[in-house]
Every structure is written in structure tokens, then in C-alpha cells.
Amino acid sequence: MDHPADGGPVPEGMTEATDPTYPIGTEVTLTADHMAGMDGAAATIAGAYDTYTYAVDYTPTTGGDPITDHRWVVQEELADAGDGRLPDGTEVTLAAAHMEGMDGARATIVSSTEETVYVVDVEAGGMTMTNHKWVVESEIQPAP
């Protein structure tokens, strides 16, 4: 499954981080390995948010093999999630569309974090992506 070239806007109701380590416009290096070419890729911060962020297992609504440990979806992309952090093992319905087959899929939370979560513009795996969702702070380093 591929991510679209433009991730589009963030979900309604997201809270911008008040003092992020990496403000909008900061050049960074990614250490995430969510997709081919991402680890070590140069990126620019396009947004920084305070929310709960989850890794999930789900089966796409379009069929195909189950996706395990998908990183990441945010609280605001879970249907009827409320405001509190959900425990690992909770079954949820995704309201995210970063990848085909996510929106409306049933999922199980594998893990979560309270780290600042970022939207980035990045070139990875030969593809330029704007507003790529999501990268958490521990997956980012200052640019060299």
C-alpha cells in the first residue's frame, strides 16, 4: 500500500503544539522506517501537534493482507475515541485516509505515545510527499 503524494489537511480539532522541539519550517532527518527510503531522509516540518498517537493492526476495507503495527494514527483519526488515551488492545474504527482501505477499517491498538507528533514534507523511496502523516518526535533528528 502506498501513501498519497499529498497527505492533505490534518483532522479537525487537532491541537497545535505550543513549544515543539522542531517548529514548522525546521529541516530535520527522519529515523523512522515506516516505509522504504524514510530512514535517513531529509524532511521539513510542516506541522506539530499535541495528541495521543497510536500504532495499530488492521485489515484494509479494500481487502488484502492485514497490516500490522501501522505507524501512526492520531486520536482524532479514531471514530468515537473520546479525549482519553486508549489502552493497548482496544478495538477501534479508523477514520483516517492516509492509505487506501484505512477509512472505516476495524483496528486494534498495538501501542501508543504522548510524544509531539509531526506532519512532514519528505522525499523517500523516490517519491516526494507533502504533509506526510505522521512522525513522532523520537523518529526525528536535527538535520546535519
Image (cartoon, grey):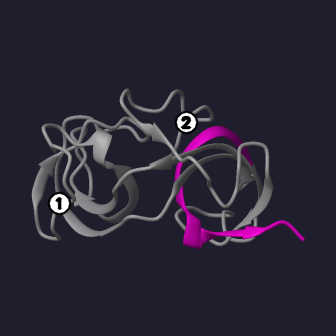
Q: Position of residue 129 (x, y in %)?
A: 67, 41
Q: Is residue 91 left or right of residue 125?
A: left
Q: Where is residue 73 in the image (x, y as percent from the top left)?
A: 36, 51
Which residue is labeled 1 in the image?
86
Confirm whether the magenta stretch covers residue 143.
yes
Q: Is residue 32 visible?
A: no
Quadrant of the rendered image containing residue 103: top left
Task: Name the mark nearer the viewer: 1 or 2.
Answer: 1
Viewer-proximal residue, 103 or 28? 28
Circle 2 packing at 10 Å, graded few (<14), some (14-19), many (20+), is some
Dot 1 and dot 2 residues touching (CB under 8 Å): no
Q: In this view, does 58 lie above or below 83?
A: below
Q: Is residue 79 left or right of residue 16?
A: left
Viewer-proximal residue, 79 or 58? 79
Start-end of magenta stretch: 127-144
Confirm whether the magenta stretch covers residue 40.
no
Q: Tag 1: residue type?
A: Leu
Q: Tag 2: residue type?
A: Pro
Residue 4 — which label?
2
Q: In this view, does 32 lie above or below 73?
A: below
Residue depicted at 55% across the width and 34% down the height: 7
Q: CA gap, disc 1 to disc 2?
A: 28 Å
Residue depicted at 22% across the width and 56% down the height: 58
